[in-house]
Image (tube, grey):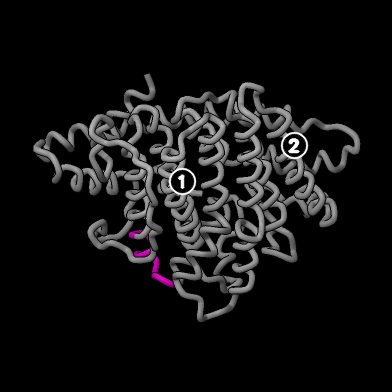
Amino acid sequence: MAYSGMTASYHGLHLMNISTQECSLKRGPIPSRRFHGVSTSLWSSNGFQGKEELSANTFLLSSCRCSSTIDQLANLREKAREVVQLDFKEYLQSKAMSVNEALDRAVPLCYPEKIHEAMRYSLLAGGKRVRPVLCIAACELVGGTEELAMPTACAMEMIHTMSLIHDDLPCMDNDDFRRGKPTNHKVFGEGTAVLAGDALLSFAFEHIAVSTSKSVGSDRILRVVSELGRTIGSQGLVGGQVADISCEGNASVDLATLEWIHIHKTAVLLECSVVCGAIISGASENEIERIKRYARSVGLLFQVVDDILDVTKSSKELGKTAGKDLISDKATYPKLMGLEKAKQFAVELLGRAKEDLSCFDPMKAAPLLGLADYIAFRQN
């Protein structure tokens, strides 16, 4: 069974011990944490070296907290790592395929054809489907099913696609390529691209309201719609985008401001995906709070890695124009912290994300833990 191999690996690779019998979720305020104080205890002398070396480093940290010998831990790590890579790849591909099929059904080609062609062009252009898979995995974590989460998961991808279409416009980031293909406005024109994004945005809410199973209470659906609306608005994705544009070329931008921008521009939709998946499944407030903390770390991790890839990978490798942030003089983590410290910061965020799931059933949490690793070690 795929999960069993994944679970075994995380007992060794986590930066904490997992014990569902000894750990319980208690209601109470969760303190806000600033992320920009990087912990040097997670640094390696050569920085963020890659999956194998990072796994070895984190495994050594874990080994210090138990009585097993380093040799035993190293052997377990090697066996578990192979299983995780195989099983998680299969999990991600399976879920992404289900999401692609659901998106294809949700947005059929109909009159007026041009707007639906433009919507489908970007929506079905591929991509990692991280947000809908996060939504499904969070729903399954607390007892739900893929079928229950799918309408909300699709809505997350519709919103994400809208943000990409608009982000690529000449008045925004002015990019010519996305996911290895010409951007929407290059194919359909700027006017249609704007409207395609608008149509996906509005349809996302309709899809949740109309297509979610009748077994889900209307109070949960209303809460999901409210959560998504807040996520997109002036205190969420739009606010982060505006702050990002305003800070272009501003040499006074500090780490605290950069963190605010990326929590609201990037992390907020990843966080919403996880939280809404949990809400749909009927998670408790305690579970939602814990999952939200995980998602905040993962969301910020996504952006830190994105900044790193922008300066270390080619346009061909990324499937989009590389070095755009440098050209537009945007504040990024490598720019403000230096490349090596940005890599080290990614290590810390990965550890925090995993720690926040330590009180859940490790078998059910395995997909979310795997997604955290996937985001940390992605190459595009």
Whether residue 378 can be seen here: no
Asked which secondary structure carries label 1, the reply is helix
Choose between 286 and 39: the one closer to the eye: 286
Which residue position holds label 2?
A: 206
The circle drawn on residue 76 is none
Choose between 146 and 290: the one closer to the eye: 290
Magenta segment: does it hold 343? yes
What's the residue at 52%, 80% (across, down)? 251
Boundaries of the magenta span: 336-344
In the displayed structure, 211 sits above or below 316; it is above
Percent position (x, y) of residue 248? 60, 74
- Dividing the picture into quarters, in which one does residue 31 lie? bottom left
What's the residue at 66%, 56% (across, down)? 233
Percent position (x, y) of residue 367? 42, 33
**Total labels drawn:** 2
Percent position (x, y) of residue 166? 72, 56
* Residue type at tag 1: Lys
- Neighbour tally class for label 2: few under 14, some 14-19, many 20 plus, Cα within 10 Å: some
In the displayed structure, 334 sits above or below 94; it is below
Q: Which numbered disc, 1 or 2, marks the residue that appears first in the sequence?
A: 2
Q: CA distance from mark 1 to mark 2?
A: 24 Å
What's the residue at 75%, 38% (across, down)? 120
Choose between 247 and 152: the one closer to the eye: 152
Asked which secondary structure carries label 2, the reply is helix
In which quadrant is the N terminus drawn? top left
Percent position (x, y) of residue 98? 60, 26
The circle drawn on residue 292 is 1
- Dividing the picture into quarters, in which one does residue 47 lie? bottom left
